[in-house]
Image (cartoon, coloured by chain):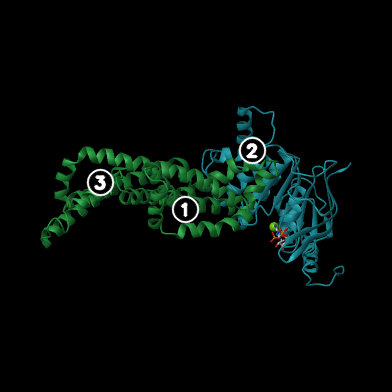
Amino acid sequence: MTNLIEIKGVRHAYKTAKGPLPVLDGLELSVPEGGFTAVVGPSGCGKSTLTKLVAGLLKPDEGEVWLHGEKVKSPRSTVGMAFQNPVMLEWRSILKNVMLPLEIVPTKLSRKQQEERARYLLALVGLEGFEDKRPSELSGGMRQRASLCRALVHSPEVLILDEPFGALDAFTREDLWQIMHQVKEKEPFTGVLITHDLRESIYLADQVVVLSGRPARTQFTLDVGTKGTRDIAHLYTPEAAAMLAMLRHQIEIAQGRAPAEAPA
Amino acid sequence: MTFRQIAVPCLAILIFLALWEALVWVMGWPNYKMASPSDLLPAYERYWSLFLTMGWQTLWRTVVGLLLAVVFGTALGMVMGFSRTMRDALYPLLVGFNAIPKATVVPIVALMFVGMHDFNTVLIAFMISFFPIAVSVSIGLSTLEPEYRDILRSLGASQSVIFWKIALPKTLPEFFGALKVAVTLAFIGTNLMEIVSPHGRGLGALFDSGKTNSDYPLMFAVLIALAFLGIVLYYVVVALEKVFAGWAERPQG
Ligand SMILES: Nc1ncnc2c1ncn2[C@@H]1O[C@H](COP(=O)(O)OP(=O)(O)OP(=O)(O)O)[C@@H](O)[C@H]1O
Ligand SMILES: [Mg+2]
């Protein structure tokens, strides 16, 4: 089976006033269909840049990004995105916010079906009864759930999440992790999750990729092993502890705080 | 609007008028020094039809000037908001233009377009009021967080779709903030022209004729009429803001 997302030898530099700033250098990443890959790495190493490349918002200077056997040249409607900032449009109701992508991408759904789909997704993440509220009336966690619905409403093949839970408190975050598993079961997608939270990465993803410091290349790939829905108690098992230790060590290498050698 | 929201400002105005009347009475000022509210009523009675026609003149020219300022200011703001180069190029020009006291421009315009009183007045109202609109729209557009753009851009939306669906509605609160400033400025512009132009029309001209005839109650009556029109215009903008940008008001509490 071919991979749904395939990133091959990507290099990218931003043009700044002080000359080019190399951000990605020799990035390799593949995600099989239905897979969920978490990407971790030092702050500012180029993780958000990576999501922009996959979404087709940026073109790499070198190398290739493939989605579903097609080379990415421009944005495509088969991608859904959510960021740390839920970017709700304050002048729209939650329902209308969720329906926004359907106003852009071509859809076969009738107006009524579109609304039903949005309502269905909102119910799936536990926002039933909040459809007609304004974003400002919701808590941060609720807004983030709505933003997740918006990213999924047009049934994208690829879901890109750039630190979506980064600004939330620990309890809300764990809530949302569980909701993510429920959503993935009902609405299958191939996912890329950028995160700073190692526990989050092994709880949600089936593959964790560690990027080196800037300019980022793929430094380490961890196969989490378990696929599908997980119990949060799994995070407190010895296997999980071993994986977390391994990832933490890799991050230290990426930050230049530990020598690049295998942990003892 | 609750009863309280109407009653409180009305009461404040009544108290203000009472204090004014009391001040003139206590100081024993004659009419040519300072008219009191009770002198104004006869003035309104005597010139009521003039007040109506002149008030209408002032009103429509202010509104037309303001509408032009909205169209031009928004267009200019869009150009500067979307293009860094245009922003760098136009900002100093715009600031310089705005720094010129409009009182000095009024006689120039009056000479340039002699006899075109309506046109001149609208032009000054426009020139004095487009600046805040242009600046607010350009700042609103240029400070749009990139994520807002990316949400739509990643779905393949065009620039114009992004403008209509996100950039424009998101700048509306700033736009109305600027419009509140612009409406008062436009009003001042109209009156400047009306007062300075010989054979002018509008409330400004009525003020001028009061001055030539040393009719102090009339002059004060005009001032109050101007204040009244200014308040009406301002609250029209506030009402429009409630309709189009009411969402920006946070729930209280
Ligand atoms: N549009 C841009 N123009 C110039 N430089 C940029 C641009 N966007 C990002 N950068 C720079 O590129 C580097 C990588 O940015 P990026 O946002 O991809 O990092 P990140 O890994 O997502 O960081 P964080 O963990 O803080 O979210 C940073 O040093 C950043 O300053
Ligand atoms: Mg980032």
Amino acid type, callout 3: Leu
Does any portion of residue B17 appear in the rendered image? yes
Mark 3 falls on what kind of element?
A: helix
Query: Mark 2 or mark 1, which is nearer to you?
Result: 1
> What subunit carries mark 1?
B
Across and down, in percent, residue A181 comes to 71, 45
Does any portion of residue B239 appear in the rendered image? no
Across and down, in percent, residue A161 comes to 70, 50
Amino acid type, callout 2: Leu
Circle 1 crowding by C-alpha within 10 Å: few under 14, some 14–19, many from 20:
many
Circle 2 crowding by C-alpha within 10 Å: few under 14, some 14–19, many from 20:
many
> What subunit carries mark 3?
B
Q: Mark 1 points at which residue?
A: B132
Query: Mark 3 or mark 2, which is nearer to you?
Result: 3
Circle 3 crowding by C-alpha within 10 Å: few under 14, some 14–19, many from 20:
many
Q: How far apart are marks 3 and 2 (CA)?
A: 65 Å
Cβ at disc 2 under 8 Å from ligand 2: no
Amino acid type, callout 1: Pro
Asked if badges 3 and 2 are on one and the same chain, I answer no
Residue drawn 14% across and 57% down? B22
Q: Mark 2 points at which residue?
A: A121
Label for residue A256?
Answer: none
Q: Which of B97 and A104 is in front in this view?
A: B97
Marks 1 and 3, the one that precedes in the sequence: 1
Q: Name the residue under label 3.
A: B206
Which chain's colour is cyan? A
Q: Distance between the residues labelled 2 and 1?
A: 43 Å
Taking the view exactly as shown, the residue that stands out farthest to the right is: A1
Per the rendering, the colour in which chain B appears is green
> What subunit carries mark 2?
A
Residue drawn 46% across and 57% down? B98
